[in-house]
Structures are given as structure tokens and as C-alpha cells.
Amino acid sequence: MEGSPDYPRPLGPVNPDDNNRPGDVMEGSPDCLWPLGLPKPFVPGARTERRDATEHRLRILEVARRLFAEQGVDAVSMHQIAMAAGIGQGTLYRRYAHKGELCMDLLRERHEQFVEEIATQYAATATSPALERLDGVLAHFVAFLEEQGALLGPIAVTDKRDWQCNEADNFRRFSFQHAPFYLWMHELFAGLFAEAVRQGELPPLDIDFTTDAILATLHPMFYRLQRQERGFSPERILQGLRRIYIDGVKTAHISMGLAEANEKATV
């Protein structure tokens, strides 16, 4: 039976101790050791669908990709996609409740590539400070949002609608915050902040709150607002993130250290 797209699944619960075991191997890549400290990636779960369902899915994605390239994502309707794919609208909506879900399926391959790029970066900066690696991840993520902005737009709009409205339970709702890719990013940022605290690069902080805050500013809806309505450049957005979540927190840490030193000096 056709259903909502089969989003990537985690390789299993991630135990913080797992990141300390040498020799972790990325599933599907027996010769590739997974960098220490990096959350295990999400990999596509096996699809269980009839042959005709598979054919419909591939045809839908191929047609949607072509129409989006020709007309722009916002200009293409689900009705147009169904007509061009030669399938009924019911068939299309049984698989994708809205354009956001379809775009998420198109993005899945790019998500996997993004994870591999972060893994490569981690391997190359294994001995670098956590905040330096955090800076690299931020730059990568902003570049990803800029590159995939057209496909992320419908996802952002759908997520905003779900936030504003309480629709019927039988409507298959989508939330970017519950997508496996977002959850992986949350674990990645939380791990970097935790490492920075352990290494003395940052003062003790509420890691979960800070991670939620940084991902809120990287939400497609918010990024879209800053790019299209505020007119901010990707460089300005990245610099703003650095000032708040790297330089700003470090400055607070330095100020605390100076205050402690002054207090000791006056004793």
C-alpha cells in the first residue's frame, strides 16, 4: 500500500559512549570508518511497496524535478505534477499529502550527501577545537540552505501552516523538526556544544536550549524570511550566527574568567 515517503531512519539509538569507540563503521561503507564524535548517520530504510507503487513514485519524482527546474517550485501545483506524470490526483496525494512531503523526498539524496560532507570535514579536523568545527558546520549548513532554498520553501510553508492550525487528525501532517535530518543536525550541534564545554572553550550552558535556538535560526522558514523579505545575504546570516553562537558565548566565557581572576586578586 502506498503511503507517505519513507524518510531516512537512524542506525539505532545513539549512546554518547558510542562516539568514544574507535572503529565505528558507516553502514553500507565497510571500508569507511565513521569519524569519532560525529552522530551516526540516518540511512534510507528499505521500502516495502508494490512494483506499480515504485513506478509511480519514481515517475512522480522525475516529473516534479523537471517541472520545478522549468517553472520554479512555487509555480508548480500538485495538480500539474499529477497531470504530467499521467496519474490520478488521488494516487499522488496518497503518497504525498502536500508539496512539502514531495520536496522532502527529493531532498533525501542531498541530505545523505550533506552528511558525508560533514563526515569528511570531521575527519580532516579531528584535532581541531570544537568551536572551530562548529564554525565549519554552520558554514556548510548555510550553504546547504542557500543551494536547496527552492525545495525547502514548500517545506517551510507547510510547517508554518501546521504550527498555526489544528487540522483534522486524519490529515498527514509534516513537521521539519521531526524529520530525521533535523534530528541528526540537533544531535550534531548538541555534541559540538557539549565538547566545547568539556574542553573549556565555553562556560557551562544549557546545551539543549542552545541547540534548539541555533536550529530555530536555521529553520527553512526563518532563512527564507531573512533572504527574501529582509534581503540578507548568506554571508550576513552566517556572520550573525557566528557572533551569537560562537563569539558571543566565548566573550561571556572570557568575561566570567576575568571576573573570577579579579575576585581572586582582591582576596
Image (spheres, rainbow, N blue to C red):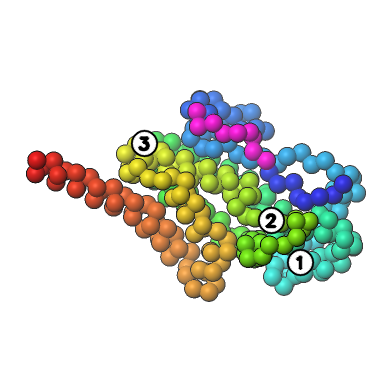
* Figure disc tally: 3
Lower sequence index among marks 3 and 1: 1
Tell me the residue at 32%/39% (across/down): 200
Instruction: Determine whether, in the image, residue 116 is placed left or right of residue 266.
Output: right
Q: What residue is pinned by disc 3?
A: 198
User: For the point 87% across and 67% down, which residue is it?
Assistant: 83
Residue 135: x percent and y percent? 42, 50
Rendered-image quadrant of the C terminus: top left
Task: Please say if the residues under marks 3 and 2 sit with CB atoms less than 8 Å apart.
Answer: no
Q: Is residue 61 visible?
A: no
Q: Mark 1 packing: few (<14 Cα in 10 Å), some, or many (20+)?
A: some
The span from disc 3 to disc 2 (Cα, nearest Å) is 36 Å
- Picture layout, residue 52 above or below residue 217: above
Q: Which residues are magenta?
A: 9-17
Q: Residue at x 49, y 73 (%)?
A: 230
- Do the CB atoms of the residues marked 3 and 1 lie less than 8 Å apart? no
Amino acid at the residue labelled 1: Leu
Residue under pointer 2: 174
Q: Amino acid at mark 2?
A: Phe
